[in-house]
Structures are given as structure tokens and as C-alpha cells.
Amino acid sequence: MTKRRGLKVDGWLNLDKPLGLSSAQAVARARRLFGAAKVGHGGTLDPLASGVLPIAFGEATKTVAWVMDGPKAYRFTLRFGIATATDDAEGEIVATSDVRPDDAALAAILPGFRGRIEQRPPAFSALKVAGQRAYALARAGAVVDLAPRQVDIHALELLERTSADLAVLQVRCGKGTYIRSLARDIAQVLGTVGHVAALRRTACGPFAEGESVTLDALAAAAGRDASGAQGHDLAGNSLSPVGELGHTSALFGYLRPVVTALDDIPALALTDREAQRLSQGMAVKLPEAGVRPAAPIGTMSPAEESAGPGTGADKGVVRAMAGDRLVAIARIDAGLVRPVRVLNL
């Protein structure tokens, strides 16, 4: 998350990150287009991956954890017959195989990868080993052997076979799932080797592919080029800078409310007095407020809901609302509603 001089912009942007840009580069371009002072994002995508990259502006950065902990969906292409050091198309080839499984064999093994499974993360990952990133150690030539860990696969299906070498699959999964590991392991179970040839994130928490916007579309709305630089009209005159009336309404129309990230936790209706106390960091007695179900901002399966931050260790967490305004993320404890994160909206 970065904070610089700029406009106070609050809300979420559902960006369709293009291939070739890192998440940090994509976020920086979006920040320049909006002229925002404070920005973060809800889940990294590698340069070789495209798709949904939720970007948080201003007070939305306080809700990033709920997006990062939420379910995600991907569409990926598995290339059979070639294993790479990175388990994707960028890495050095480390093994090959002439085995090409047919559709029936592939469909038969997919159920074994659904539910809670054990998965060994790729050696080239951002996980830390003895205080260092695994990918840094791997690039330095060290042997990196990461321990398997449990991940949740809510759905996994074959979409199409474009050739004997390539299979396009779709997966919906929980936090911490590595699609590169999934592709590698599917190939191994089928008696061959494989890697991810293409990857696109189609959903991240409440943000879906069909509602995402490209950098080019944002730039057009802002009167700038896709890098965020100020645009010009046909006569060569500079267009209005972000923040002036004229084109910002189209640009800012792409923002979604801060509360969008909290669609899977219940809402707590506050009186004006309770809202004032919570906004000042003070607790509110539970009997004074009424719990009501959260508005259906997004649609989630029961399995996805069970994996969200509103259950388990975070049971008792609510979004405290004064009408449509998000006052705080709070926790109900011993008959009191205690603010966890106060939002200045």
C-alpha cells in the first residue's frame, strides 16, 4: 500500500490487469489516472497472468484483508509434456514426457483435486524460507523444498481441449492456492509432466471478470493514455487534469463502494449515537443495536462463505452501518461491539 500527495479517493476498482504488467505497475498506473493519494490491492497477479485485480483507494485499503482472504477463480491452460523450474511458461525446461492423457483420463482424476487437498507450493514463490523469499533462493541456485500445505478447491472442471498438448480448465479455490502447483500435480497423477501455459483470474472475492475494466478504458474516461500521462485533443491541447470537472465523472463511475469488500459478513444497524461512539473508537453495548443480514452485494456458495473472514477465527466480526454509510469493521465480544477498523467516509 502506498500513500502520496493527491486526491482523497475512497472505493474499490475492479481492474482487468493486462499481460506483461506486474501488479505493482498496474496499481501505479491506476493511481496516476485517479490522482489518488492512497492505494493498495487485493491479491497479486504475476506479469504472465491477466484478469481481476481489485485495487483499493483511500479508506478501502482498510478492507483489503477481506478480499485477499476471500475465494478466487481462475481459468488456466495446462500444457502437457513439458515441466519447467517455475511451473509456468517462463521457467527453464527441466523435464519432458511423450505421454498425452485423453479427455476421459483427465476427467476421471479431477474429483481427487476437489475439496481440501494437500499442495506443495512452487519453489519459485513469494513464501519465505529462513527469512528469505523462496524465489530469491531458487534463482540463486539453492534447492528449495517447501512443505505441503492444505488448500481448498471448491470447484474444478475441464472447459476444453484445444490440442493433445493443451487443456483449458477452470478452478474456484480458497486463499493460498497455487494454480501452478495444481497444474503440475494434475499432470503428475496422469503419468506425465506439465506446466501452466496461460492464466487468467476471473474472480477475486466479490469482484468478477464481467464487471472489470481495462486500463485503456480508464484512460479514455480520464482523457489520458494508459500509462496515466495527461492526454491531448486533436489540436494538441492538454486535456483537463484529473480532479477538474469535465471527465472525472466517467472515470470515478468505475469505482465501487468501500463496503463491497465486506459482502460476506453480517451488517450491524447503528443509531446516530452509536455511530458517533464507534467512529471515535469507543465500544457500544450490543442491546442498543440490532443485527440484520448483510445486503446481497455478491453471491457466494456455502463452501465459499465458510472460508471467508466472517467465520472461524473471525466469527463475531460485523460491518457497522449508519444507513448506507460504513462506520467501522467491528467485533462483537462479551455483549459489546468493539471497533476493529474505523472508516472515515
Image (cartoon, grey):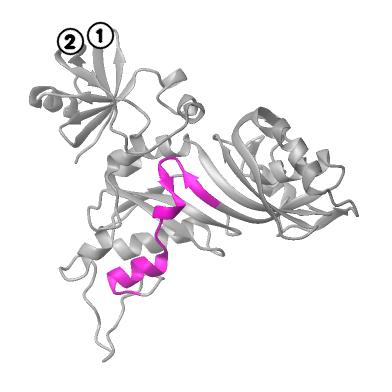
Return the x and y of residue 312 as percentages of the image width and height.
Answer: 46, 19
Task: Please tell me whether residue 52 belongs to the stretch shown in magenta.
Answer: no
Return the x and y of residue 83 as percentages of the image width and height.
Answer: 81, 52
Of residue 190 and residue 188, the one placed in the foreground of this image is 190
Residue topped by disc 2: 287
In the image, 66: left or right of 338?
Answer: right
The three-letter code of the residue at mark 2 reads Pro
Return the x and y of residue 318 as percentages of the image width and height.
Answer: 30, 24
Label 1: which secondary element: loop
Return the x and y of residue 128 as percentages of the image width and height.
Answer: 63, 38
Up-down relation of residue 49 to residue 65 (above or below)? below
Of residue 117 and residue 132, the one placed in the foreground of this image is 117
Q: Residue at x 28, y 69 (%)?
A: 222
Q: Residue at x 47, y 61 (%)?
A: 25
Q: Residue furthest front?
A: 104
Residue topped by disc 1: 335
Q: Quadrant of the C terminus?
A: top left
Closer to the N terminus: mark 1 or mark 2?
A: 2
Please rate how many residues cluster around mark 2, counting C-alpha atoms within 10 Å: few if below 14, some from 14 to 19, many from 20: few
Res. 193 in view: yes
Residue 242, image quadrant: bottom left
In the image, 116: left or right of 311?
Answer: right
The three-letter code of the residue at mark 1 reads Gly
Residue 341, image quadrant: top left
Q: How many marks?
A: 2
First to last magenta residue range: 201-224
Q: Residue at x 29, y 7 (%)?
A: 334
Alpha carbon of mark 1 to alpha carbon of mark 2: how far?
Answer: 8 Å
Q: Residue at x 45, y 60 (%)?
A: 26
CB within 8 Å, label 1 to label 2: yes
Task: Please tell me whether residue 207 belongs to the stretch shown in magenta.
Answer: yes
